[in-house]
Image: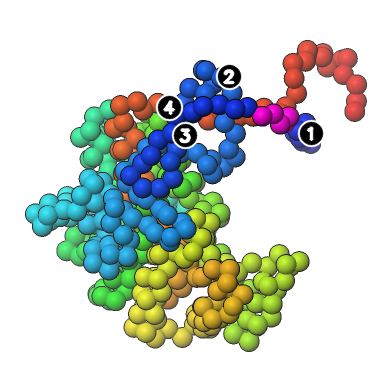
Amino acid sequence: MATAKKSTSKPKKKTLKLELDRYSGNVGPDVVDVQALYKNHGVFTYDPGFMSTASCQSAITYIDGDKGELMYRGYPIEQLAQQSSYLECCYLLLFGELPTTDQLIEFEDTIRNHTLVHEQLMTFYHGFRRDAHPMAILCGVVGALSSFYHDSLDVNDPEHRQLSGYRIIAKMPTLVAMAYKYSIGQAFVYPDNGLTYSGNFLKMMFAVPAEPYEVNPVVEKAMDRIFILHADHEQNASTSTVRLAGSSGANPFACIAAGVASLWGPAHGGANEAVLDMLAEIGSVENIPDYIEKVKDKLNPTRLMGFGHRVYKNFDPRATIMRETCHEVLSELGVNDPMLDIAMELERIALEDDYFVSRKLYPNVDFYSGIILRAIGIPTNMFTCIFALSRTVGWISHWIEMLGEEQQKIGRPRQLYTGAKHRDFVPLSERKKK
């Protein structure tokens, strides 16, 4: 089969001096306004991966990678993880302020009232193979929600947007738990609205109809912290995907399904899975020194997964909280798992070895969250689903914010074209074999 011909031409580099307007946000780097760059000067900007491009204005989340700082609506993540709950953070991300007692009670009641999914949606699960990846199932069923909730699909109506947000946040734990139960051949467990958001999720994951189930408060607290720490992370790949899909006017369920699909990529949501794969590759504590030497060898491609971060150049502020939570869970459950022993020894080495300390290769949130999820009993292929569940409120908050902008436009990135120039079509009979 023929393959697409790769471009071999290289773009020509030229120098262009321009005067552009510069704007300052409340915190963080200034931005240069290039909106009229093509109109006034006939050029586009070139920024692969959008690493230096602010795609939007946002008042939701701020990250300072050099300082190791993460804030939701101005509140440090450390304070929220220690003192708040996931649903309180959801309210904060959605509405911009921490709720009063009455507002939080009303919000929690609203979410509880939307935890059930339509009974017919369950038939969707039975259309998948039993060995289907849970993320494949989640992509399908989240998008399918739009076929059940026609009364909240007008993206131009603020009340519809809010109702859709409530529904998706409330139903995502149910959908994720159902994907897990289907994959192991167990009966679906209905939501229990007498429990907290995290406690309800744990029950739907691990309860069976034949036996009573009690939520472990230490595990429940850990699950809630995992949700909080992953709730939003500024303009990452999946959030940008949701915004781009939403800019076309797509319904909210389709936009969140697009976010789920983007998150599924191993370079984005699969990082904690990669940590477990690495631990399995190491095999035992005795093999760690040899593995570390491979990591230090510049000529060896071996990488230490779950250490360092693309955004955080100092330390991941979420990792400090997750480390404490990780040790709490392992102590509470007393899990005897050789892979967890490997993880703890790797942590000790990374925090003491000059090679890692000097390069600021500290364990990140993915390192600890993967260990916690494994200790709780959640299989590796469910990790990204947990991430999607956590991040749903961030996606919805950005989607609502974007649609509320007065100058909102459909996303349309530009390109630097390096393909063939104009050429005339050659009939098949006249083409020579190359």
Within-10-Å neighbours for mark 4: few <14, some 14–19, many 20+: few
Total number of numbered labels? 4
Give the residue pinned by disc 1: 8
Percent across and percent down for residue 126 are 42, 51
Q: Secondary structure at mark 3?
A: strand
Q: Which picture quadrant has residue 229? A: bottom left
Instruction: Classify residue 108 as left or right of residue 293.
Output: left
Q: Is residue 289 above or below residue 267?
A: below
Relative to residue 225, is residue 319 drawn left or right? right
- Seen in the picture, residue 386 relative to 338 is either above or below; the reply is above
Q: Which residue is mark 3?
A: 32
Q: Which residues are magenta?
A: 11-15
Image location (x, y in percent) of residue 175: 35, 53
In the displayed structure, would residue 417 be above or below residue 109? Answer: above
Q: Which residue was labeled with disc 4?
A: 410
Q: Position of residue 40 (x, y in %)?
A: 52, 18
Q: Tell me how far mark 3 sits from mark 1, CA to CA.
A: 32 Å
Q: Are marks 1 and 4 in contact (CB under 8 Å)?
A: no
Q: How is the image coloured?
A: rainbow
First reached walking from the N terminus: tag 3 or tag 4: 3
Q: Amino acid at mark 1?
A: Thr
Amino acid type of the residue that numbered disc 2 sits on in the rendered structure? Gly
Picture quadrant of residue 159: top left
Residue beneath disc 2: 42
N-terminal-most mark, 2 or 3: 3
